[in-house]
Image (cartoon, helix red, strand yellow):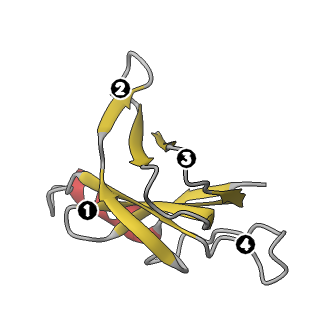
Amino acid sequence: MAQAKITVTGRRKLCRSHAGDSVLPAIVQIAWGDGGVEEDGEAVKDTTGNEVGLYHELLRKNIESHTYLDENETSCRYTGTIEKDELIGKELSEMGLYDADGDLVAYKTFMKKGKDEDIVLIFDMDEIF
């Protein structure tokens, strides 16, 4: 089963921002990797929230867009695209959101998804409060 968590770093930054001790940096990048499954290649790794980076990052790009998912603006979807000429032949199994400080603030693992050369992959990652 796919696992997703706001990291300890992300939660610390939220807490410090709410307390007025720091300014919360924007989420600006999305990254993909192939390190989200166990050595057997089948079982999805459990997320702990202690991750500080992807296990094996393959590509990082700027967020293309974000959308609020509800009228209360308590959920936000971040979107990134892997183009036809990117990551051909790779099997993706993890992704993360990075803030403007370069810190991983949300991390997700999932079953392997292969990338063909003639396919564009669009990924959404939701931050829900």
Q: Is residue 61 left or right of residue 24?
A: right
**Vertical order, 45 against 24 (above or below):** below
Q: Earlier in the sequence, mark 4 or mark 3?
A: 4
Q: Could you tell me which residue is drawn at 22 percent across and 51 percent down?
A: 26
- Residue 103, how many percent across, how many down? 31, 71
**Which SS class for mark 4?**
loop
Q: Amino acid at mark 2?
A: Glu
Few, some or many residues within 10 Å of mark 3 (<14, 14–19, 20+) = few
Q: Which residue is mark 1?
A: 16
Identify the residue under disc 4.
37
Q: Secondary structure at mark 3?
A: loop
Count neighbours of disc 4 (C-alpha within 10 A) and say few if under 14, some if 14 to 19, many if 20 or more: many
Q: Amino acid at mark 4?
A: Val
**Residues at marks 3 and 1 touching, judged by CB atoms closer than 8 Å:** no
Residue 82 in the image: x percent, y percent? 44, 51
- Residue 16 to residue 66: above or below: below
Name the residue at the top extreme.
71
Neighbourhood count class around disc 2 (C-alpha, 10 Å): few under 14, some 14–19, many 20 upward: few
**Which dot, 2 or 3, sits closer to the camera?**
3
Q: Which mark is residue 118?
A: 3
Distance between the Cα atoms at labels 3 and 1?
44 Å
Q: Residues within 10 Å of mark 1 (few under 14, many from 20)?
A: few
